[in-house]
Image: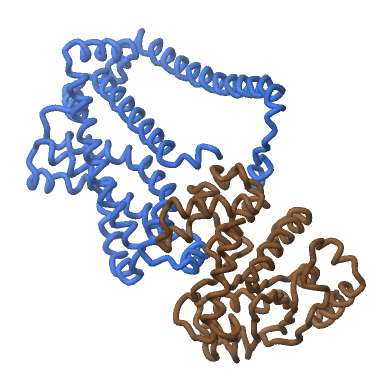
Chain colours: A blue, B brown
Amino acid sequence: MTVEADMAPVHEPDRTSQIAPLLAKRRWSRLRATLAVLVTQLAILAAFLLFWESATASNRALAFMFGSPSAIANFLIQMVRDGSLWRDTSITGLETLLGFFVGNLIGTLIGLSLWYSRFVSRVVEPFVIALGSIPIIALAPIIIIWFGTGLISKVAMSTLSVVIVALVTSYKGAVGVDPDQINLMRTLGASKFQIFRKLVVPASLADIFAGLKLTVGFALIGAIVGEFMSSSDGLGHAIFKAGSLYVIPKVFAALVATIALALVLTFLVGKIERLLMPWRRQL
Amino acid sequence: MTGGMGQTAERTTAAAAHGAEPPLVVEHVAKSYDFNGEIVPVIGDLSLTLKEGEIVSIVGPSGCGKTTLLNTLCGLLAPDSGHIRWHGREVSGQPQNVGYMLQKDLLLPWRTALGNTMLGLEIRGVATAEAEDRSRAMLDQLGLHGFADHYPSTLSGGMRQRVALARTLVNEPDVLLLDEPFASLDFQSKLLIENDTMGLVRRSRRSLMLITHDIEEAVSLADRVIVLSKRPTRVKAAYDIALGSERPDLMAVRESRDFSQYVRRIWADLDVVLQ
């Protein structure tokens, strides 16, 4: 904190002309550092793929067991051509997004509102812990019986994977608000609802977004597990089918699509976070 | 300066409505905490009065329950016994027209300097345009012109504390309760912000109670210094500080002979054992 305090802006417009080249220089050195990281990451990835390819090229048994990058690429191209890649990815993406949205909405609403009553939160606590300890996969058969084999059952699985985490992180954010800050609001005459709306909710945003980033992955796992259990499309279905037929490269191809989906969704959450919390951008 | 005129008018009517009752009277207040099943008395039997337009400093040995006292006065804690009268009346909950400020600036990081200053007005339902105008004027008066749209994370410690002061003063409180508000600042920022604060408080004839551990600060700013004892806290001594009510230069005040005498006597009262 003290570091930022010392960097308080100084209004001296006549000096900006001298500062401009300095800023450009700093920006360039920052960019170079980022580039170095990126190049190293690409080099590691390339080395890994090269090793994989060369190890499996001469050995058919290994190629069968582990696939190879070129075979995976071929399957990806084939899946793009027949449209199944886009179809499966968009279906799994839709399930994940819906589960992510519904689960986080419900979880966050409950988590934040538990701040309101110490009594209710104490009553609810053991139930939340009990529900949170259920492995979601164990619920899959029941979910399919209740919601069928279509979209709804996957969304339900995804929602269930998300909701408890969202509840716990948002509640932790809400009760973690500085009590001095609450006292200050009280001395300014704020009602409990005003304290909630003007202090607790915005103060919890950082924790809520930490939860959002965490639950992108959980929502995706929920959707894929749902597709594993029973479905006719989606990336989980593609992985399951290819796996049962021992087409290992196709399993990896679907996995690559899954990873890409997870990265895109995580990136989107980060974007929204920076949009909703502009004050953190300046840190 | 039209804002200043308005404040004076408001003050006159407020004083008339309250009659001759002093803004704050504390009578035989006691407060204890429950600590691991043991009852620890923090405030023993404490009585004091804050008069209209008076600046009172409260000093005491470390850990003597100064903050507990302040929180009790603000209605954030209930006293075990005794009475707290604001303008002659006992209030349940938070007293009206009392401004409260701590060592931590407690600015909301998601609000700009202006947004933070407006907080109290917003809570009381003052129209946004009016709240914004008054807040901007207050920030200008405290030397923060041009920083209204800055987030706290981009301001220095002294500036942040000025925003916190603006947030307190913009509500035009009759009484200000400050708990070591300048303790975390460096000496220069501290002296500057003290000068500005006292100027604003004296000009609008508000009453101020300053809790501090800094004896020099206490003497240089106040009309009266109250020295508290160790826990359970009582009033140990009180000094009327005759350094003149107009103190345009707080550095010059510190150089006078009377000043060092007050400081020495209060230091003796605090009974600090040097090791």
Q: Residue A87: x, y in percent?
A: 17, 22
In the picture as drawn, the residue positioned furthest to the right comes out as B257
Residue at 35% from the left image edge and 8% from the top image edge: A57
Q: Residue A89: x, y in percent?
A: 22, 25
Dividing the image into 4 quarters, which one contains the N terminus of chain B?
Answer: bottom right
Residue at 51% from the left image edge and 51% from the top image edge: B133
Looking at the image, is B233 positioned above or below residue A48?
below
Along the line of sight, which residue is nearer the eye, A240 or B149? B149
Residue at 49% from the left image edge and 76% from the top image edge: B95
Looking at the image, is B97 positioned above or below residue A81?
below
Residue A14 lies left or right of residue B247; in this view the side is: left
Along the line of sight, which residue is nearer the eye, B34 or A148? B34
In the picture as drawn, the residue positioned furthest to the top comes out as A58
Along the line of sight, which residue is nearer the eye, B203 or B51? B203
Residue B258 lies left or right of residue B113; in this view the side is: right
Looking at the image, is A40 positioned above or below residue B58?
above
Q: Quadrant of residue A241?
A: top left
Q: Quadrant of residue A223?
A: top left
